Amino acid sequence: MKTFLRLAVLALPLALAACGGKDDLDELALNDTPPEVLFNEGLSLRAQGKLRDSAQKFEELDKLYPYSEYSKKSLVNLAFLNYSRGKYTETVTAAKRFVTLYPGDEDSAYMLYLAGQAYFRQMPDITRDQAVTRKAAGAFNELIQRFPESEYVPDAESKLRIVHDQLGGKEMQVGRFYLQKRNYIAGINRFKTVVVDYQTTRHVEEALFRLTEAYYALGVVNEAQTAAAVLGHNYPDSQWYKDAYSLLNKGGYEPSEDSGSWISRAFKSV
């Protein structure tokens, strides 16, 4: 898979030096094994499918020879191995360490991608807190902004759409709860987040209807009319628009856009 092509380069055989020292992780201070030996041992273990042992070898190298070129290569391998083993917290730790130490390195793009993937794999269902989902968005956004030409950007953008859809869905869930409690202001704030921040997701149609509903319940008719008008303009065949039109029509009103409304401005800014 092209996602991990970078690892093929890092796995190129390096000249082995004579072995020396101890491998016991509890005696790192006494280990004088050259970094190139540790690195190649890590690669050999990975090739044999001994991913855990390989990861431990790269961890040992990073501790013994921090900031070295071999340590840098080890961090990339370590992040990949942890991700492959489903060790997502450890993946993020290694990836963040690399990006912090080598922010301008071309492999930082790959590390941001792996961090985003690790968060993405941990995204909870919509009923739970979405802190991890927001972290996935942060990692993918940083990758796209800092390394726009990276080979990992297309997949990051694809994943980001899924992330935004989930975050928008969470806002809708909370907003509906507030509507049921007749806490219209709190509900409006949630639906506004969907319209402003997650406008390209499938939730925006319902968000505009809910804004129509909430503003109408508060007696803020011009905003209710604007929400319905924007909904009708952008999604004329939507059932949500038909419902919004019907709601206003029962009170003797029709959709009518106020160009000064935040709703109107939000759509014109896209």
Image (cartoon, rainbow, N blue to C red):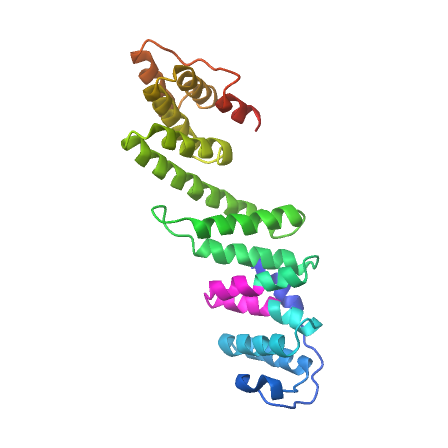
Specify whether 119 is left or right of 62: left
**Residue 153 visible in the picture:** no
State which region is magenta: 76-94
Quarter the N terminus occupies? bottom right
**Residue 258 in the image: x percent, y percent?**
49, 15
Up-down: is 249 above or below 168? Answer: above
Q: Quadrant of residue 253?
A: top left
The residue at the point 52 percent across, 16 percent down is 259
Up-down: is 140 above or below 75? Answer: above
Asked if the magenta segment contains residue 106, the reply would be no
Up-down: is 24 above or below 160? Answer: below
**Residue 232 visible in the picture:** yes
The residue at the point 42 percent across, 43 percent down is 166
Q: Quadrant of residue 16?
A: bottom right
The residue at the point 41 percent across, 16 percent down is 225
Quarter the C terminus occupies? top right
> Outermost residue toward the top?
252
